[in-house]
Image (tube, coloured by chain):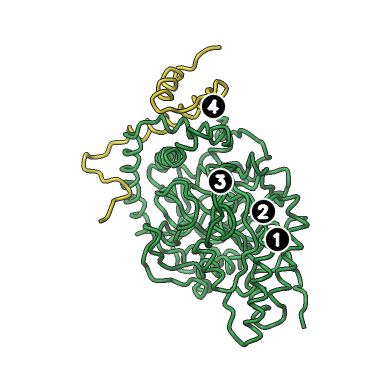
């Protein structure tokens, strides 16, 4: 079976985070991770100033 | 003399309350009618996971005694309602659609919204099916079976408040409560052809409900008429210090505002992102609502696609954080579709979520600016009418997309910044579909007034299913 390009990352992250990965789960995990990283890349590419505040602001 | 309701499975909450208040019918009779309807229809619709019949009968008896003593019963006197099973209900474990939560001890008291509806005279009659841990737009559930759409039982209700949509659209209860993190009230409202209100973020207290994404979680009502929606909403308003994001604004009743109508309100139609990827029925529904309101102006919500991406990202990361330990220890007890999303999300670097929260503030400022020029914005609620149960993909703008993640493509950019929305049902044939009426923060009254005007015009209505 061909390995997904994200498989090495998934294996390393699963070990680091102590996450169980069943062999049959891997394609769905990889597909979800790919979509999530695409959304993240789109957001990451949007320019914001260094002093941009996040949405939820803690108030003491 | 106790009489029958003219049409017990389709009476509105307002009609029931009037009849119970004036003594035309007893609350006990209303409850028996509702229990009979549930016992006939729920085996088909699979909306309920618990029917609290003993509690409902006891409560009805109490109300009837109060009336006999001349006490006033409230604006929702004798109205049966049910809640998505992520609300705490005294005596039941708060399932949140999961198998794992069956092991939780039963809740010791009701969620505040249940207490408030009951204080207005309503009667809790059960807990409703939902997508596992609310990470869902379909209404399917691997542990409890899918909620089924009353208009076509082979089709989805939408989710995650699937049982809430099915129970109200199917005539099992006139009012239900659900939650909406990214669209989980508006999507089932759309696919089931009923009214749904997602209030402003922070309007209604969420304590004693099982969370999903604290940044985005909202609770709200479903109904078959705008008046019922407003009656339920008004009864639930008010500060609760036990929800740290609940606003301490004064109660702002809306029922008396409904008749003010939509005249003089500036209403625009969301363009760009919200005009792409629609199936023809979604376009027809928006056009029909816009024409009835004489809403001719288009408005561009800036960077709505990025808002959806950022909402997607924060949702999956916050959700995974909430469930990380359960995923580690109980992976095989999750719906695999939910588990695999959480596992993937746990691997996403936190740096990316932080950027999404910063974008959120930028986007909020941009969208709030739009409300200096308009009072309300119309947008589709879902790209299509109810898909088949089990359907995995659909084609949006020629691209094959997963149904589960994309039914909320038009709802996510709105809840992302907590705007209030009334989802109104356009009764197309063979299946209904919803339109979002979006207003500025804390202006639920405006969205409800517009919905009521549309209902009076006959443009929107909850169609009665053939059950």
C-alpha separation, residue under disc 2 versus residue under disc 1: 13 Å
Q: Are marks 3 and 2 in contact (CB under 8 Å)?
A: no
Rendered image quadrant of residue B247:
bottom left
Q: Colour of chain A?
A: yellow
According to the picture, the residue beneath numbered tag 2 turns out to be: B48
Identify the residue at horizontal 56%, vertical 59% (top origin): B89
Q: Residue furthest bottom?
A: B70
Chain ID of residue with mark 4:
A
Q: Where does residue B336 sit, x and y in percent of width and height?
A: 57, 32
Rendered image quadrant of residue B35:
bottom right
Identify the residue at horizontal 75%, vertical 67% (top origin): B33
Q: Are marks 1 and 4 in contact (CB under 8 Å)?
A: no
C-alpha separation, residue under disc 2 versus residue under disc 4: 30 Å
Residues at marks 4 and 3 on the same chain: no
Crowd class of label 4 (few under 14; some 14 to 19; many from 20; radius 10 Å): some
| Quadrant the C terminus of chain B occupies | bottom right
Q: Secondary structure at mark 4?
A: helix
Instruction: Specify which label sits upstream in the sequence, 3 or 2.
Output: 2
According to the picture, the residue beneath numbered tag 3 turns out to be: B101
Q: How many marks?
A: 4
Q: Is residue B83 above or below residue B119?
A: above
Q: Residue furthest top?
A: A1
Identify the residue at horizontal 62%, vertical 60% (top origin): B82
For this rendering, which residue is in front, B406 or B246? B246
Q: Secondary structure at mark 3?
A: helix
Q: Colour of chain B?
A: green
Instruction: Determine which of the numbered discs, if any, sits on residue A28 in the image.
Output: 4
| Quadrant the N terminus of chain B occupies | bottom right
Chain ID of residue with mark 3:
B
Crowd class of label 3 (few under 14; some 14 to 19; many from 20; radius 10 Å): some
């Amino acid at each position: 079976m061909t390995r997904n390009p994200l498989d090495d990352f998934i294996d390393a992250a699963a070990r680091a985070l102590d996450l169980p990965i069943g062999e049959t789960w891997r394609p769905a995990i990889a597909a979800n991770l790919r979509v999530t990283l695409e959304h993240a890349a789109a957001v990451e590419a949007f320019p914001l100033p260094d002093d941009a505040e996040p949405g939820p602001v803690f108030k003491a | 003399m106790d009489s029958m309701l003219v049409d017990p499975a389709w009476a509105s909450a307002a009609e029931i309350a009037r009849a119970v208040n004036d003594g035309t019918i007893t609350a006990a009779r209303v409850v028996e009618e509702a229990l009979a309807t549930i016992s006939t229809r729920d085996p088909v619709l699979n909306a309920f996971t618990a029917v609290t019949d003993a509690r409902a009968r006891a409560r009805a008896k109490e109300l009837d005694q109060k009336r006999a003593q001349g006490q006033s019963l409230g604006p929702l006197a004798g109205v049966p309602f049910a809640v998505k099973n992520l609300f705490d209900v005294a005596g039941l474990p708060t399932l949140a659609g999961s198998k794992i939560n069956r092991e939780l001890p039963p809740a010791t008291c009701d969620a505040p919204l249940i207490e408030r509806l009951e204080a207005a005279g309503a009667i809790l009659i059960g807990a409703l099916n939902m997508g596992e841990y609310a990470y869902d737009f379909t209404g399917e559930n691997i542990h409890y079976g899918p909620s089924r759409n009353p208009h076509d039982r082979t089709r989805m209700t939408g989710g995650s408040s699937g049982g809430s949509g099915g129970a109200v659209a199917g005539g099992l209860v006139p009012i239900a409560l659900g939650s909406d993190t990214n669209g989980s009230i508006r999507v089932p409202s759309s696919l089931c052809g009923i009214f749904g209100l997602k209030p402003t973020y922070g309007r209604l207290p969420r304590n004693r409900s099982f969370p999903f994404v604290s940044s985005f979680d909202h609770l709200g009502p479903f109904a078959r008429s705008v008046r019922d929606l407003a009656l339920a909403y008004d009864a639930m308003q008010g500060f609760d210090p036990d929800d740290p994001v609940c606003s301490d604004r004064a109660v702002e009743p809306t029922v008396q505002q409904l008749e003010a109508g939509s005249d003089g309100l500036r209403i625009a139609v969301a363009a760009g992102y919200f005009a792409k990827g629609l199936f023809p029925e979604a376009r027809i529904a928006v056009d029909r609502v816009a024409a009835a309101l004489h809403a001719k102006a288009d408005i561009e919500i800036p960077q709505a696609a990025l808002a959806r991406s950022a909402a997607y990202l924060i949702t999956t990361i916050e959700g995974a954080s909430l469930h990380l330990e359960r995923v580690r220890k109980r992976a095989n007890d999750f719906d695999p579709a939910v588990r695999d999303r959480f596992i993937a999300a746990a691997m996403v670097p936190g740096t990316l979520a932080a950027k999404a929260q910063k974008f959120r503030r930028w986007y909020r400022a941009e969208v709030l600016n739009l409300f200096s020029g308009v009072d309300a914005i119309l947008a589709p609620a879902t790209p299509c009418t109810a898909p088949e149960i089990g359907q995995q993909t659909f084609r949006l703008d020629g691209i094959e997309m997963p149904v589960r993640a994309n039914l909320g493509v038009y709802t996510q950019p709105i809840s992302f910044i907590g705007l209030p929305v009334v989802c109104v049902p356009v009764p197309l044939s063979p299946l209904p579909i919803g339109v979002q009426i979006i207003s500025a923060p804390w202006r639920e009254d405006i969205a409800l007034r517009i919905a009521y005007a549309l209902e009076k015009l006959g443009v929107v209505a909850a169609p009665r299913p053939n059950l």
